Amino acid sequence: MLDMIAPSLAALPPVTSDSLLALIALAKADPRTDKIDVGVGVYRDAGGATPIPRSVKAAEKLLWERQETKAYLGGRGDVRFGELLRPFVLGRHSGDERIDQLQTPGGCGALRLGFQLIKLANPKARVLLGDPTWPNHPPMALGVGLELSNYPYYDRDNRRIRFDEMISALSAGRPGDVALLHGCCHNPTGADLSDGQWAEVTRIVVERRLLPFVDLAYQGLGRGMAEDAAGLHGLLDVCDEVIVAQSCDKNFGSYRDRVGALFVKTGGRDATATAMAHVLQMAREMWSMPPDHGGAVVRTVLENAALKADWLVEVGEMRGRINEVRATIAGADPRLAFIGEQFGMFSMLPLTKAQVVALRETHAIYMADSGRFNIVGMSDEALPRFIAAVVETLDG
Ligand code: LMR
């Protein structure tokens, strides 16, 4: 009798929702008008707005005037978009024919495809990922059935990279294991590897024959466009196989348009063509073809010299504001000085979860439970209140 009962959707277990998405909803629902949302990673200017960059707006206008059809483009999306990204993402390796790419729905689409490709090529591969890392990395890798193994990355209490421990953990990796690395602007800590540390990581990756998978979601918002990809370029110098998940969502301010690309390098052009054929088939099974608008806009910016130059100015402006706000927070209290040494949109405050919750309840300040906050999540006007509340909380 029992086996007559059909499995039911009602029997599904509850889900622990993604912590960052839950935080967005929580902040949105707070009726206090002076709330500060430094949870999700969205750039806000001095006035607290997230503007569409000038170059993007101008490209959208051009696109509206010129686009004559919305007929399908195919699984790779906008091919020119990918080609025009190559000089930024790959630098001196941009002409390497062993590297190919396709457009994906945001960096997440690229991460998912990359993990799936790895699972297909090497089902036993483990993904070595930093502790801490972006909260969506583990479920994405687990979702395709890959095994995870953490390497120590950041010591929050002492505000430093646990580099020696990271190196020993990577050194224990098995050939074919995946070293998941943040290209720049480490999320959630802001603690980026130095050039020397990248060189050492690269040496271990080669020695242990690990597969580097670089998440490059914030290029240009740390030290500069080229500087932020220098670690990746060093890996490409010596590794035959490299995967890159790239996102334009932050540096083109095109968050909700979901614009990204997956780059795959293998040891030879034929092997890359085969890998890309698999990737295209996987993409076909998931989303068939990526949404066009955001990629078309990025392509329109990058193929127009004036718009491209203006976009680079705008990326520089975002970077400048991030670094200015960092300096202000760092200068406010010696316990916050470390923030001035870090890069990108995030740093992690040495707060307990209870303190983070207290900031939320008492001051309407929303940040991730880990203490990660968005450096440019608030207006200039709100900044002193944010600093005062954090210092008060640190004082206990
Ligand atoms: C973040 O970490 O806040 C962003 O990457 C947005 C997201 O999708 O989590």
Image (tube, rainbow, N blue to C red):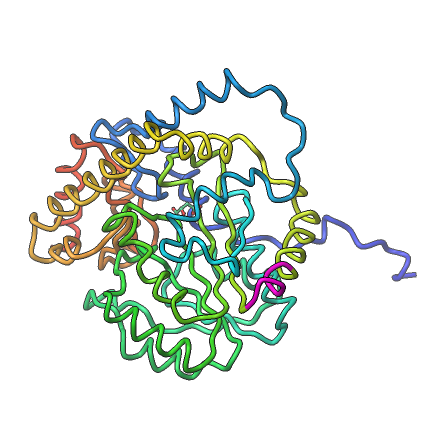
Give the quadrant of the N terminus: bottom right
Q: Mostly what secondary structure, the magenta segment?
A: helix
Give the quadrant of the C terminus: bottom left
Question: Could you tell me how many numbered marks the image carries?
Answer: 0
Judge from the rendering whether residue 42 lies leftward or rightward of residue 257; answer left or right: left
Residue 188 appears in the figure: no
Judge from the rendering whether residue 278 lies leftward or rightward of residue 183; answer left or right: right
Judge from the rendering whether residue 188 lies leftward or rightward of residue 295; answer left or right: left
Q: Residue 364 placed where, x, y %? A: 27, 38
Q: Residue 357 placed where, x, y %? A: 30, 49
Question: Where does the magenta region start and end?
Answer: 268-273
Q: Is residue 37 magenta?
A: no
Judge from the rendering whether residue 207 lies leftward or rightward of residue 330; answer left or right: right
Q: Residue 350 placed where, x, y %? A: 22, 59
Q: Residue 168 placed where, x, y %? A: 35, 82
In the depicted view, which residue is nearer to us: 363 or 87? Answer: 87
Asked if 298 appears above or below 14 in the picture, the reply is: above
Name the residue rendered at 37%, 79% in the picture: 204
Q: Report which quarter residue 269 is drawn in.
A: bottom right
Name the residue rendered at 25%, 50% in the picture: 222
In the depicted view, which residue is nearer to us: 147 or 243? Answer: 243
